[in-house]
Amino acid sequence: MANRIRDLTGQVFGRLTVIRQDGRTPSGQVIWLCRCDCGNEKSVPSTYLVSKQTSSCGCLAKETTTKRCLDDLTGQVFGRLTVISKDDKNSPSGNSRWKCQCECGNMKTILSFHLKQGKTRSCGCYRRELRVNDLRSMRFGRLTVIDEDCRSDRDSVYWMCRCDCGQFTSVAAGNLHSGDITSCGCYRRETLINDISGQRFGKLTALSLIDTKGGHAHWSCRCDCGKIITARGGSLTSGQRVSCGCYGKYKHDWNSQRFRSRWEVWLSMWYDVNGIGWGYETTKLHLNFRGRDITYRPDFTLDNGTMVEVKGRLRYAGFESLAIPNFAVSMGYDLMIIQQPELEARLGLKLSRLQYIYAKSGLPGCYDAILTATSR
């Protein structure tokens, strides 16, 4: 069945009023002919209207740019510069220029956004003063200037400094005077590192600090599943990292337990209905599988000690997914592997029927169906 077109005729989006449909884009989106408040007409794809990406024929952007260019900066002070008047000519990109007088007496014409953003704060005299000043033996925060190190292509002077921690670093004179750099980086590292050892973040427990490479604290963490990972301190404290990755695999909540698949949920329901005690992924087996040491957790461990692994249809799960459970059985572990026929026999219901019930009534409906089937 063809998708029904949402009729936008007569609707208003910003300054645009939709008049009628005007064809489709190559990708199949509907294009609408719109009339702007300024009188111009413009054809716009429906997604641009609904998402508010387009709200005029273009006149709004022009007005905003014109208004920005017409901002009167006369008399305003930016650093050492005082704006005297607007220059007669704008830049090739349309930005306004302003004539400014520096505290040293020089006149200079500067772009408006360079003034507003603080990119230009003098006629150039401040930079020249920094190049001339001898900073030897002066202190800036934790840094003590030792000697001139080098000059950049733009004639900026770099000074070799010794930090209180004993490290040496080369710093531009401007960064020293402005206070942007006051240490070799040790101060930032100290302020970044909060001791979170022993604290829990979701399923992760922080164990110890590993390093602070790149200005970030990296912590060794143990997940509840037993895996050891490395995570950034900021990712832990902000809640962005809450597991080794296993948490996202558990998609189904039932009876205060998260399960990987609905099959496992249904089997747990059958155990509950029949009064069989169970634990989910509570047993950890250490196996040497195909020449490497692995950790394997069966899906269920029953009160009588029997372990149970639930696997899907072979055409989905594949024989390879049974390799580790079968290897555990060959090693003598009391492990039962349940697939579709065995699961349906226990539940007394076809899985296709449970899928239908799940789509209609969710997991509570599935529990009622299993309870009814078991009591028959």
Image (cartoon, helix red, strand yellow):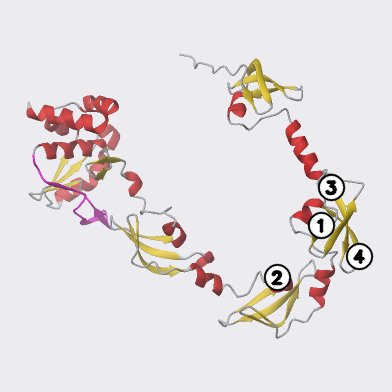
Tag 4 and tag 1, C-beta contact below 8 Å: no
- Helix, strand or loop under label 1: loop
Residue that appears at 86% across and 50% down:
97
Residue that appears at 49% across and 14% down:
2
> In screen coordinates, is 62 left or right of 100?
left
Q: Which residue is mark 4?
A: 106
Q: Residue furthest front?
A: 75
Tell me which amino acid carries mark 4: Asn
Tell me which amino acid carries mark 2: Ser
Q: Which residue is mark 1?
A: 76
The CA span between labels 1 and 3 is 15 Å
Mark 3 Cα shell of 10 Å, populated few (<14), some (14-19), many (≥20): many
Residue 354, position in %: x, y?
A: 22, 27
Mark 4 or mark 1: which comes first in sequence?
A: 1
Tell me which amino acid carries mark 3: Ser
Question: In front: 71, or 234?
Answer: 71
What number is the disc on residue 178?
A: 2
Question: In front: 251, or 151?
Answer: 251
Q: Which residue is mark 3?
A: 96
- Helix, strand or loop under label 4: loop
Tag 1 and tag 3, C-beta contact below 8 Å: no
